[in-house]
Amino acid sequence: MEVQQGALMSVQDLVHELATECGPASAEAYLGRCEVVSDIWDAITQIIEVQAHRISSSGFEITLVPSVGDKPPAVAASIAWGVGNGDQSPTPTKTTSGTTAVMTTSDLTEARRQLDRWGANLIKSSADVLNKWVEVLDSTYDSGIVDVSNSGQLFQLKAKYQNLKEEIDKRAPTFRDTYNKGYDFVNGHADFKEAQQLKEILDKLNDYWIRVTNVIIERHNILQDASHKYGEFRGKVI
């Protein structure tokens, strides 16, 4: 849960960065999705906390009673799930707000499934935001062959691609974190119906990221080398 909560906070940060870079309209849908996820996250967390409190309060009571004859000791168990002594009905529990919540193992199973679903959606949202950022990056670099006719243009292009590379370096840890967490989720939920869809999203994002960033880094390196050689040439001439 802590990992998924961290992922939620990471997505929210990315969305706010997207709003700053591309305008509020570009991030409005993602902000709405984050709010929905936050609300559901709080609800599920409250359910689990109620059940955890119930377990810690009731605990497991095991009594070993010697029996007559050669029979082994009888074991009487009172289990926190409300199952024991033939009683199959869940026990109502008072929450901190005073309302009554009836919890069963199926409730916890469904809560876990809900966490898995929203965990997948968090990773998808993070991938969507990163994909949007790569789209913006894709539109900033020059396509085709760029003619450089003077030193001023050379240094201007060098500065541009230096800034783009720094942006890539800044965003790369978030990309790797999202990609790795996404594939950890996919590998750990082979029977989860959203896992295959998430895998396709991550693969497309990875291909797009590599294609765009490789072009920018390659041009950055070429301009760095050209600038260095120009400096050497200028030093020899002067």
Image: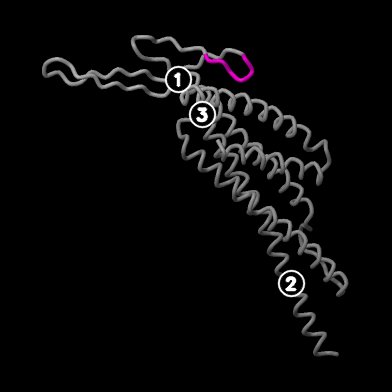
Crowding near the residue tagged with mark 2, few <14, some 14–19, many ≥20 C-alpha atoms within 10 Å: some
How far is the residue under mark 1 from the one under mark 2?
Answer: 62 Å
| Label whose residue precedes the other's in the sequence (1 or 2) | 1
Image quadrant holding the C terminus, namely: bottom right
Residue labelled with disc 2: 224
Mark 2: amino acid: Gln
The stretch of residues the image draws in magenta is 93-98
Q: Residues within 10 Å of mark 1 (few under 14, many from 20)?
A: few
Q: Residue furthest left?
A: 70
Q: Which element is circle 3 on?
A: helix
Q: Quadrant of residue 58?
A: top left
Give me the disc on residue 105: 1
Q: Residue at x 75, y 59 (%)?
A: 164
Q: Residue 89, which numbered label?
A: none
- Residue at the location (86% across, 72% down)? 149
What residue does disc 3 label? Answer: 193
**Helix, strand, or loop for circle 1?**
helix
First in sequence: mark 3 vs mark 2: 3
